[in-house]
Image (tube, rainbow, N blue to C red):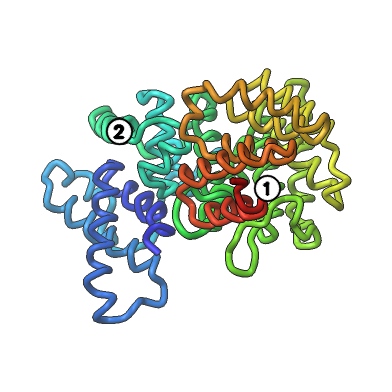
Amino acid sequence: MFRIESPRVIAGVTRIVRDVGIAEELAQDALVAALEQWPRDGVPDNPGAWLTAAAKHRAIDLVRRRERYARKLEEIGRDLDTTTPFEEPADPDDIDDDLLRLVFTTCHPVLSAEARIALTLRLLGGLTTPEIARAYLVPEATIAQRIVRAKRKLATKGVAFEVPYGPEREARLGSVLEVIYLIFNEGYAATAGEDWLRPALCEDALRLARVLAELMPKEPEVHGLAALLELQTSRATARIGPSGEPVLLKDQNRRRWNRMLIRRGFAALGHANAVTTTGPYALQAAIAACHAQAYAYEDTDWGQIAALYGLLAVRSPSPVVELNRAVAVSMVDGPAPALEIVDALTAEPALRDYHLLPSVRGDLLARLGRTAQARAEFERAIALTRNEQERELLRTRVRELGPPQS
């Protein structure tokens, strides 16, 4: 429950204390109070509201204890110890959303791009340091240092808790979009744990993308991200089986895909493509749209998908994009040319501990009849993944290869 609610708790408390580091500590204090009180008094009807109120009361006490906050306390008013949102000047370009404020605050240009994303994923997405490191394919110690330094810098620079306007908002937009994208990805395919999906993260990311699309209607990549998330979310319920196990794309019951979300995705993609330059999120949304248009797996236009991945590799090159392109190429030209692409990626340092590299390579080897090598690749992928559902899926792939040949 705390993992689900902590972003809202931290965002609400940050509005009071204006320090994301202190807000995170106060949210943790509220968790300790819950661990002490709930076993004795029972779980409240609205646990999220309870945690928010507990953290805000601690924030209020902290403000009252510090003389330097006395003037701010006077401005906040006598009703400070309620959970009613604070009144702020209305602005036609403003939006009253603490989570969105938190995203833009932690994406302030005083921080490096890497620090902005790591901190926002930690506070808004509720991701652990290992999960963020996994998402970025960098050491955990590096992410931990980024987070600590980022919180310290926001505090020392006195960064305001706000959604900025005009050019300043545009300057932070790229980081904001990337943060929302990574939060969604963690919810869509959890890095670690027992669950394949974390729907709360997907919902928060999708909601924020929709809010941004309304807030910035002339930004094509905002619509591109919204389209991508709408289309990906449309498949969410079909991606898990009765016991929470992953269901691969080719095995999904497409009648369970949410047609309303697909329509929303196509509408957002239309807004994104209203300009001549197509950005990386719109290209990924176009790939998702190819899947959404296919009423059966056999109807998928893999040629178009491979071409779109080729454009994406030019527009936003990365080894992960190239790995995805290899999968599409294998569906068009067969596993052999795709394996050449994947083999070239094995020397990439960023993919050294990325479990999907040996997973894809194992699949291609299996399709080529190179069973022993395929088994070795799947076993390496099993050792690398930290999600139990995905690990079991890979074990199934090993079993399907049959017993090892002596």
**Which residue sits at x=48%, y=37%?**
135
In which image quadrant can residue 333 be found?
Answer: top right
Left or right: 208 as drawn, with respect to 139: right
CA–CA distance between discs 1 and 2?
32 Å
Of circles 1 and 2, which is in front? 2
Q: Earlier in the sequence, mark 1 or mark 2?
A: 2
Left or right: 323 as drawn, with respect to 368: left
SS category of the residue bearing label 2: helix
Categorize mark 1 by other alpha carbons within 10 Å: few (<14), some (14-19), many (20+). Answer: many
- Find residue 85 and report its horizontal and vertical position in percent: 40, 57
- Find residue 79 and report its horizontal and vertical position in percent: 29, 61
Left or right: 258 as drawn, with respect to 350: right
**Tag 1 residue:** 232
- Find residue 191 and report its horizontal and vertical position in percent: 48, 47
Q: In the displayed image of the protein, which residue is found farthest to the top?
A: 314
Residue type of the residue flagged with mark 2: Ala
- Find residue 370 and report its horizontal and vertical position in percent: 68, 37
Categorize mark 2 by other alpha carbons within 10 Å: few (<14), some (14-19), many (20+). Answer: few
Q: Is residue 75 above or below residue 176?
A: below
- Relative depth, front residue between 289 and 10: 289
Question: From where the camera sits, is residue 236 visible?
Answer: yes
SS category of the residue bearing label 1: helix
Picture quarter with the N terminus:
bottom left
Q: In the displayed image of the protein, which residue is found farthest to the bottom?
A: 41
Residue type of the residue flagged with mark 1: Gln
- Relative depth, front residue between 308 and 392: 392
**Tag 2 residue:** 141
Question: From where the camera sits, is residue 207 visible?
Answer: no
**Which residue sits at x=24%, y=45%?**
22
Left or right: 249 as drawn, with respect to 89: right
